Image (tube, rainbow, N blue to C red):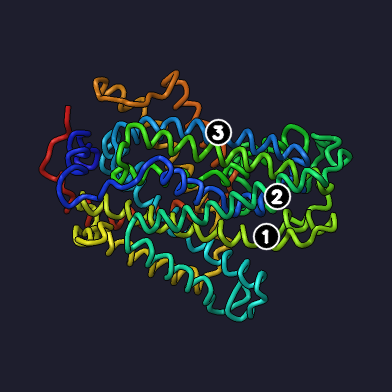
Amino acid sequence: MSILRTKSVEDVLARGEAGGGLRRRLGPLSLMGFGIGIVIGTGIFTLTGVEARDHAGPAVTVSFLLAGVASLLAALCYAELASSVPTAGSAYTYAYATMGEIFAWIIGWDLVLEFALGAAVVARGWSGYLASLFDLPSSLFGEDSVVNVGAILITLALGAVATVGIQQSSRVTNVLVVVKVGICVFVVVAGLFFLDAANLTPFVPPSQPTDASEPGLTQPLSQLLFGIEPSAFGITGVLTAAAVVFFAYTGFEAVANLGEETRKPSRDLPLGLFGTLGVSAVLYVAVSFVVVGMVDYRQIDPGAPIASAFESVGAGWASHLVSIAAVAGLTSVILVDIVAIGRIGFAMSRDRLLPPSVGRIHPRWGTPYRTTIAVTAGVALLAGFVPLSSLANLVSIGTLFAFVTVSIAVPVLRRTRPRLRRPFRVPFSPVVPVLSALACLYLMTNLSVETWLRFLAWLALGMVVYLAYGHRQASLRDVSSPS
């Protein structure tokens, strides 16, 4: 079937090396900057308090650790494919080379949703933090505004940076990463002086039943399918919190999207991926431990857990530093989201699943400027006019869907292309890729039925676009699948 035709790895690599491609300017530190820039964001400033209070208690630190292990499984799969097939598009390109065109389109369409919606959601959060920090008018900043001017302005500004060049984006991201990582380290060191051992006992609070979640579309899919009774705390609560805080790690796949702009991808991409996860996991675990040690988990403010923790011990001055770190953290997330989606659009247009003119590279800046400008405009409109709180889970389900695909692609490509050069190899394959896929599927079942229906509707819209344009225009229409 033509919709299952695949793209040879040789063709993928040749296109990346051919003239008109993206320029290789990034090393491992720049890749880690992009990765940490997108991973260390809202998770460390909000999820810590929410999950400690509602599900895990002080053991939220264990939840972050378990979520980091699950992310590591997916990162191992990304590292093998990214180092073997270093090109723009990451999961989209891997699916094209292993499962076929239709799956590649679905993944590409899914990634567009993930990064565009993620950037819009974070832009609105950035606007709210800025308003809180400088006491700006709520009519122009934050969720109460009719038109969120702050979200629009930050999106346009960072879109301009992403359009001008990857090096400029890297420099801005690295500065922001240094600021927020430095303040996170300060939070840990300063917070240690205010620890109260009583707040850490019991470390894993006894399990207790909770009120059943609202029936219908808002309940988790697993609860609907298997009749699981919701509970808080205990081991179940720790695992539930792990499923939620896992989403704090999502975004590291943006590093794989920069494979075509990496100077030595066989070495630098694995370093960038694992360095991102290593630094992020240490910061998440350390900050969460300090927060639950400073404040009784039942008294944590879920909206601003770190800032309120310092205020509760008489160190309110530190909350201003936390707010600055939050603004810097969210700024880098938006920038990396825009950069990543520009590369996905470039890869899809190069394969003619999208119009080729969309992915044209600027002769001076060396970026897919048309895609980046279009993405910036779309994200600015979403961020400025659409309250996105009810849609935020779509970012998570889109990410997990991509993780499942990448995990499956590793053993498939090993079987179909056993002699392909693999600078990095997933250990214990296919066991590790299978575990990665199953872990991600489990986490997907913890999302609401409503989220699943919206996700399926987005994929259905994508299928209409594919059948109407992409399938007929794809560059592989007259090319047979490689043996």
Above or below for 105 versus 205 = below
Is 88 situated left or right of 152 in this image? left
The x, y position of residue 296, in whole percent, is 84, 47
Q: Is residue 424 visible?
A: yes
Task: Give the residue drawn at x 55%, y 33%.
Answer: 70
Q: Quadrant of the C terminus?
A: top left
Residue that numbered label 1 is attached to: 321
Of residues 418 and 334, the one nearer the viewer is 334
Q: CA distance from mark 1 to mark 2?
A: 9 Å
Whether residues under marks 3 and 1 lie with C-beta atoms below 8 angstroms apart, the answer is: no
Mark 2, residue position: 187
Amino acid type, residue under disc 3 in the picture: Ala
Camera sees residue 227: no
How crowded pointer 1 is (Cα within 10 Å; few <14, some 14-19, many 20+) is rated as: some
The N terminus, quarter of image: top left
- At horizontal 19% and vertical 41% (from top left) the residue drawn is 2
| Residue hosting label 3 | 70
| Image mark count | 3
The percent coordinates of residue 23 (x first, y second) are 25, 49
Kindly indicate whether the residue at mark 2 contacts the one at mark 1 (C-beta within 8 angstroms): yes
